Image (cartoon, grey):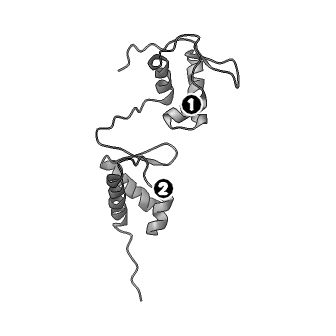
Amino acid sequence: MTQQVSPRGTFLEIAAEVQALVAGDPEMEKLPAVADLMKRHGVSRGVVLRAFEVLRREGLAEPVPGGRWRVVRAGEEIDRRPLHERIADLVTVDGLKAGDEFHSAPVLAERFGVSRPTVTKALDKLEAAGVLASAGQGRVRTVRTVPNRKGRS
């Protein structure tokens, strides 16, 4: 009778393997897919997520909305503000004035690394707040007003 391998501690082995991958590739931005690690190690999703949680506690990774995990590098600053606030900052950063054309959703999606529907929701919030104006679907958005930065850090 063969003895089965115990899954106890396997999540620590997976965490150590992923940590070595991250250390060996300074360009790595995302952790390997959960499904890939499940298949490679023959474990459940929960075991892989426990490994990722170990990496999160060590400050090496963090979850990203949508199910993926990203690598966190030492000394890296991450802007965790809501997307609509970061997009509103582009008005000031890019030196736009009232009446100027604003960036399209595909351009913003690429710039922030999110999907177009996510950008569209953020742009809708900025329209509701009066920062942007839209002439309708498929039309170019324009800057209505420059956001006030007082009181923000």
Residue beneath the point at 56% across and 30% down? 107
Task: Please give the residue where the numbered disc 1 appears in the rendered image.
Answer: 107
The type of residue carrying mark 1 is Val
Which comes sooner in the sequence, label 2 or label 1?
2
**Quarter of image, res 49:** bottom left
Report x, y in % for residue 52. 39, 54
Q: Nearer the viewer, residue 92 or 56?
A: 92
Q: Which residue type carries mark 2?
A: Ala
Quarter holding the C terminus is top left
Pick the front one: 90 or 43: 90
C-alpha span from label 2 to label 1 = 26 Å
Query: Of 65 and 22, which appears nearest the observer?
Result: 22
> Which residue is at 70% across, 25% downward?
138
* Left/right of residue 77 with respect to residue 43 in the rendered view: left
Residue furthest to the bottom in view is 1
Q: Is residue 9 visible?
A: yes
Q: Please determine whether, in this image, residue 11 is positioned above or below residue 56.
A: below
Residues packed near mark 2 inside 10 Å, few (<14), some (14 to 19) or many (20 plus): few
Mark drawn on residue 33: 2
Write the residue at 35% across / 61% down: 17
Residue 118 at what x, y percent from top left?
57, 34
Which secondary structure lies at badge 2? Answer: loop
